[in-house]
Image (spheres, rainbow, N blue to C red):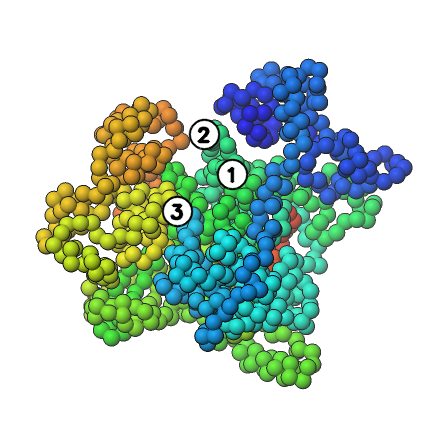
Amino acid sequence: MNTFLGFGREHVERHYRKTGQSVYMHLKRHVKEKATGAAGGAISRRRNGKVFLDLELNRDFNGDEYDCEDEAKLVIFPDHFEIPLPNIEELPALVTIACDAVLNAASAYKKQEPDSWDKEIQVSKHARSLRQQDNGVRIPPSGWKCQKCEMKENLWLNLSDGAVLCGKWFFDGSGGNGHALDHFKDTNFPLAVKLDNLTPDIADIYSFDEEEAVLDPQISEHLQHFGIDIIAIQRNGTDNGHHNTDNTNGVRPRVSEWEVIQESGMKLKAVYGSGFTGIKNLGNSCYLGTIMQVLFSIPEFQRAYVGNLQRIYDYSPLDPSTDFSTQMAKLGHGLLSGLYSKPPMKSELIEQVMKEEYKVLDWHQPKGISLKMFKALVSNGHPEFSSNRQQDAQKFFLHLINLVERNSVGLENPNNAFRYLVEERVQCCQTQKVRYTQKVDYLMQLPAPIEAASNREELIAYEAKRNEAEENMRAPPEPVRARIPFTACLQAFTEPENIPDFWSSELQAKSAGVKTSRFASFPEYLVVQIKKFTFVVDWVPKKVDLSIDIPDFLDLSRLRGTGLQAGEQELPDLTPPIVLPEDTRDNSMNSSDSPEIDESAAMQLAEMGFPLEACRKAIYYTGNMGPEMAFNWIIAHMEEPDFSEPLALPTFMEPGPSVAGSGLAATPLDNHPPEESIAILTSMGFPRRHTVQALKATNNNLERALDWIFTHTEREEEEEETSNALSDMADTTEPNDSAFSNANMHSDSTLSPDQDASGPQIKDGPGRYELFAFISHIGASTMSGHYVCHIKKEGRWVIFNDHKVCLSERPPKDLGYIYFYRRLSSS
């Protein structure tokens, strides 16, 4: 009754011991079946005085055969003394008022609903009077890029002049450099629509002048002005609902796909117990549910969160609903404990059979666990995942990987199982010289070359018949699904990719280049996404209807990178020049001032929790190309010993002096921290030297300095006082080296030979794999339809279709979207 946090029976005692809070309100709903022959229908909730809590009603108990009765009482710990409510006589007036306020309050989840992007959006005042320039701009259906930077995501089309520019930087590492807003400030053109999310039903429109998301009743005319036919999208696109089975346009593949992927019409056997718990669909949340089902079938995630459940709970913050590790542990426990996946009682089965109400797949299935709190946390602040619309499961996977990465500092990081290094070979077409680089990745995107289909002649004949039917206004022919060999997909993956804007360090200018990718290391778990979504000429987002003979066993050994080969010449190791303003260019040649750095971009990164000096280095070393490029640099270098040290470069006149001698460290950030800040941290038990170092690395920000101290303890091994203080105050924090060595103990794999022990942890090993899970998408667009996953458990394929969990009879491996492979042991 102090924090208004809710706890189940098994957790309330822990909260009392942890906080000393002793007064709790116990809320309970009793569901009773009406006696046989009871007269009258069910009493509506508003007229039933026994139902007063604003709780989500279970549809199974919402009919005429059940009565609900709510109970509320105060419980005083530690004696569990109970006081029934309402109780005006025995309780002080202030307590009674507080209790009444809680009982009459709206559900927390209902409070979240008005914040959804789908509600309370008003028509823009500029919509009907918008003036569009007749400049001949036509927007293609794909291949967009910001006109002012290299961003290819989060792009916005200005509805006045057709400029395509990037949006703002988001906390999760996605976003852009804010060029769309800059364009508005320069031109005063108020409305922009997001290109990434343009679907038949949805157009995300933002008014820079009104500073909010808006509606545009004339959006179809405004888009048509730039060659985007939204009416054609509406005519050819699909319904945005969760289950899109309507055959309104005469195209039949989606119906077949729906039946095959869900194994409809088969008498599938339901399974129960640990690891067989379903997830309730919250309405277009299956993209989240399928990803979480697969992740928690992986031992590394089970061990990191469920294996450390009690430790995570004991050291969770006072508000555990905002803690990522706590919510991951809670979700993992719900899926793996078996408490929410129990077979029905024999009497219940007999009763249901007698009523003849059973259905295939729904025969007294448990309703699964709800992910409302988890979804609210992981989607907080994200413009797409915080909505109630369907999303791309691949994008959510990478979003979750990012969250795990940021919340695993000092702990075992389950992402190590997915992380691998990609070797990129770039060749300058003019000089034929090459450059080899490595980057971290978590997912392999595999092309699906339709031209390599084994039934190509059949596809050509079908296309001709379909065009003829359209011209003569006849019914379309029976659809033909492309059958693509998996070997053709691998071959397409290894093909060189053209880089038209490649900057050649040999020529000191832009030139044509080609890039090929290989594996510099192989991950323990390989995630493969089939690139089966594309845009066609008339702006209809289309999923190519194809089937790929996905192998159960995969050997990628031949795709391992080889590095620089004999006879190859390397490109000079030079970065593109940083263009300085004219007024500072001359001064930089004869002074030792700091290099030109976009400080606003550095601050955007620092707001995500990274040390400011590291952010400034990331901006510099990526050539001021924006926060996204710098973020990738941070992820690749965050484990380096000097990650948080100030940027140290030689002066233009004098090669290679020390930081102190060069004057580059003589910035305002290097001033001595305020004594008040030092006193606050030293009063918490930290040595003065370590405190000063933390404040300098975080621009004297106390909160970030404290976090810096906890995440840099391994660099101060000589400071015994620090180690003792940390072990006493926060037993949850372990040195990074220990965490990584513990993670590696669970695998026979070793670190990459080229990998520094302090860098990103790579569990390299053989490139031989076995398929153990796949996620399938049903529908014509990732922004609509439905997701289902199949996971191999105990030698059997199991289908997870929202809350329904059954043994699979015919797993549709050829129609999957994302595949998960585990590495085979060396033996």
Q: Residue at x 21, y 68 (%)?
A: 508
Q: Is residue 432 left or right of residue 235?
A: left
Residue 315, label in figure: 2
Seen from the viewer's position, the closer of residues 194 and 774 is 194
The percent coordinates of residue 356 (x first, y second) are: 81, 49
Seen from the viewer's position, the closer of residues 6 and 105 is 105
For label 1, the SS is helix
The percent coordinates of residue 113 (x first, y second) are: 61, 45
Q: Residue at x 42, y 41 (%)?
A: 407
C-alpha gap between disc 1 and disc 2: 13 Å
> Is 650 placed above or below 228 here?
above
Residue 327, label in figure: 1
Q: Residue furthest left?
A: 654
Q: Nearer the viewer, mark 3 or mark 2?
A: 2
Query: What is the crowding at mark 3: few (fewer than 14 residues within 10 Å), some, or many (at least 20)?
Result: many
Q: Residue at x 53, y 78 (%)?
A: 456
Q: Is residue 422 left or right of residue 205?
A: left
Which residue position is annotated with label 3? 416
Give the residue type that dot 3 points to: Asn
Q: Earlier in the sequence, mark 3 or mark 2?
A: 2
Q: Earlier in the sequence, mark 1 or mark 2?
A: 2
Query: What is the crowding at mark 2: few (fewer than 14 residues within 10 Å), some, or many (at least 20)?
Result: some
Q: Is residue 625 left or right of residue 322?
A: left
